[in-house]
Amino acid sequence: VKLTTVLDSCLFVIFGATGDLAQRKLYPALYNLLIEGRLPENLAIVGTGRRLETREAFINMVDESVASFSRRSEPKFKNQFHRMLHYLQTDFSDSEGFAELASFLAQVEESQQTRGNRVYFLAVAPEQFGPITEQLRANRMVRQSPDTWQRLMIEKPFGRDLDSARALNAQISALFPEESIFRIDHYLGKEMLQNLVAIRFANSLFEPLWNSRFIDNVQISVTEAGGIGTRVRYYETAGALRDMVQNHLLQMLALTAMEPPVDLSAQAIRNEKVKVLQAIKPMTPFEIEANVVRGQYAAGLSGGRVVAGYRDEEGVAPTSTTETFVAMRLFVQNFRWAGVPFYLRTGKRLARRSAEVVIEFKSMPGVLYFASEPRLQPNLLVIKVQPEEGVALQFNAKKMGGTEGIVPVKMEFCQNCEFPHHSPEAYERLIADAIRGDTTLFTRWDEVEHQWRFIDSIVEVWQEASPSFPNYGAGTWGPREADELLRQDGRQWHVSD
Amino acid sequence: VKLTTVLDSCLFVIFGATGDLAQRKLYPALYNLLIEGRLPENLAIVGTGRRLETREAFINMVDESVASFSRRSEPKFKNQFHRMLHYLQTDFSDSEGFAELASFLAQVEESQQTRGNRVYFLAVAPEQFGPITEQLRANRMVRQSPDTWQRLMIEKPFGRDLDSARALNAQISALFPEESIFRIDHYLGKEMLQNLVAIRFANSLFEPLWNSRFIDNVQISVTEAGGIGTRVRYYETAGALRDMVQNHLLQMLALTAMEPPVDLSAQAIRNEKVKVLQAIKPMTPFEIEANVVRGQYAAGLSGGRVVAGYRDEEGVAPTSTTETFVAMRLFVQNFRWAGVPFYLRTGKRLARRSAEVVIEFKSMPGVLYFASEPRLQPNLLVIKVQPEEGVALQFNAKKMGGTEGIVPVKMEFCQNCEFPHHSPEAYERLIADAIRGDTTLFTRWDEVEHQWRFIDSIVEVWQEASPSFPNYGAGTWGPREADELLRQDGRQWHVSD
């Protein structure tokens, strides 16, 4: 990953500038990038949306967003930030309005000397991805030339199955070359997922052990304590499999399981990631029944208070079969991983919020301490993604003192303990990377394609039968079947404390 | 290592009962073992020495020793401890006196019902090892029978070269079988050296990496901030090579480098340790010149105050050539370790007190991060023996935040941080082991033999030439040549903070 020291001037155009994502993530990220001197000298942020009418209103909204969600606050940058902000009220479905936007952008481009370079950030509902792309084309707002660039940053979901993803991709890739498309999986912007690659390939210690000869199984968990929040409409038609597994968990799998790339370029790293996704062993419908567990939460206790079940959430159908939990066992069929189960787990309203990758190393039953202490714990390497960011290694040591006996102990490295607010938000990194044209932390089309192919195979089977939901209580670790999945293999989920 | 649940009753006879070692280490250890219920039901402690006249005086002395040096104090055990204490004033060189001791022991044995089992602890100057053994023989105080046992615990130094060690060993092994001889190397009683074996063989993670394919070099350091203390007379004739390297450092080497034993028995573990000592590559005089550095401290700053040079210490000859520092590079010539240098270092009046084993793993120059970041630190596994007890793993991680770059970070496990005084003294473990007949943590004769053979080869070369002492300042890390030794190999001493 190379840092171009001089950043190109550009317009940063946000579609959906008055929406939730823009307010919670984009303005705070841009503000922090400004404070840290990581924006080009000439950067104009152009917001466009339906709700607000004037630039003043827009600036007020941005100020509030920064005040509420930014991890840093240095008032002396406020004026400079204000000067970067521009706004035009637009209805994306109205082609006249879009033509007006085109000329507004040209105007700002001229006055701010941003030289024709543009990032278009689609922070809008997925059904608008297509129409906006079409308008960008119709208004000739994308003209890749040797001297200027236009890039597209596009939020998840990228389609809702392989077919719709293909259609969307056909549309945008008719307009943008692959290296100008920045498909966001914001998990890839998280510190510890970037660190996973560094830890694997900047150390000689881990790589020799990173294979089926030494690793017993890998557990990838993203558990949420919260419920459905404000995303009901989208979630009801998506579910945990599409919302979390298709992108975040499969990307975590790809980073964990990938071969060493030939170099650290975006292309080389993504070449290796896609090979992992491609190597996921396809499952027959019968195997899917046996290896994939879905769940939906009932009412329960979460964080000390009684919370409603999913079907009682506002806007959810009382007979909804949307899954809020998925656990699965899958295999990566290549030389490195043959025979090593990967257990994935994600869900809402679980006992605790946590995202981590746990590498469980093989034990040696019958040998030395493994013989005399039958309950010896396996060695675990835990990459903690959130809320704590760090690495823990659980190993066995002599019990202190005169008594015999071996106990599991932990070495820990905490990345965000010393400076809890120092750790940048994923969007800071992702926006900075898009501006400097680095696609490493974005999903390439062939990755998306393999992800959907795998997910579709599961959805197909699920559609055949109605699940008996709800099947787990809010505040628990999910349905019994998810534990059973590992117990069948003589294993268990590792939950780090 | 098996724990016999019922401990045999016995006499614990201390020769040199009024001496420094007994007061600083033995009584506090026995007291702590009593508190922890780790002594046999009938245990009588018999002190014998020249200085004190009465049992009352002895008990007072023991009380003071416990008050000053014990890590625990539970007054309710005081009376019980007093009842265990017996004393006879003896001059060991007087055979009549010794005969009196023999009948005194028989008497205590009778009254305390200790059934003929005895531990003889030689806490005396080395020149008395022989005479006392001879008296034990002459007075028939050792008669191994199927029902009773007599054991010998013997302090270092075990000889001052191979010849003298052989003579001593011939004398004591004429009287005691090998399994009844407990040659003390108190480093083996330290928590983290026992833990080194557990860490290596109770984990599947470390063993695959524990060889020349993955390890670049091993550094074994025992550095002392203190000077010569009260041991001038002994030290002047011994020096750091005999005092520290011959026993402690070579034992640390043996534990670090040994093959996995067939089981965890004393015999099996010592079989593997002796193989390491045997495999140390002998050096020609020329190689000794090139690979072994000796030093002696000059005056300097230690702990913030000016301290005298070694030659100015009271009792030291003004032209003394005794070394207070040794550093060396050696090789263990077997399949596991061929080509991996082991660097040993010990000395007095160094910058800091610390004992540790550092495993430096190989780097991969030219590959991925190792290519782009030429100063990438190697991976280090550090076994901290004292003063902190624990394990640290230094590895490389992504620098936090948006900037690129890899930095070394540390995972740590601290064994004695939570309960700093919980960690038992080495002598507690050693005494408990001798009473239950476990020789694992004691040095077998063949180990001693190989240790002296190696040490003698160095002494022989050193005797040929006068060193230019002093050659390092108190409070530094030793002579320049010790750093040079590693710099020649493109390496450096790792000092953990």
Image: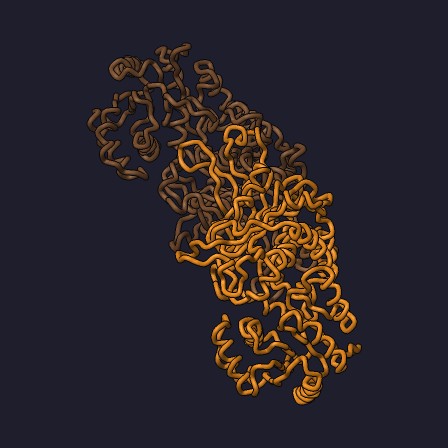
Chain colours: A brown, B orange
- Image quarter for residue A81? top left
x then y, percent, for residue B310: 51, 58
The residue lying at 73 percent from left, 78 percent from top is B136
Q: How many marks?
A: 0
Which image quarter holds the N terminus of chain B?
Answer: bottom right
Is residue A112 visible in this depiction of the protein?
yes
Up/down of B18 relative to B364, above or below: below
Up/down of A320 relative to A41, above or below: below
The residue lying at 72 percent from left, 82 percent from top is B116
- Depth check: give the residue in front, A175 or B128: B128
Decide if residue B389 is on the left or right side of residue B179: left
The residue lying at 52 percent from left, 59 percent from top is B318
- Depth check: give the residue in front, A147 or A325: A147
x then y, percent, for residue B120: 67, 76
Decide if residue B24 is on the left or right side of residue B455: left
x then y, percent, for residue A279: 62, 30
x then y, percent, for residue A37: 32, 29
User: In the current view of this chain or complex, which residue is farthest to the front?
Assistant: B319
Up/down of A141 relative to A377, above or below: above
Is residue A239 visible in this depiction of the protein?
no
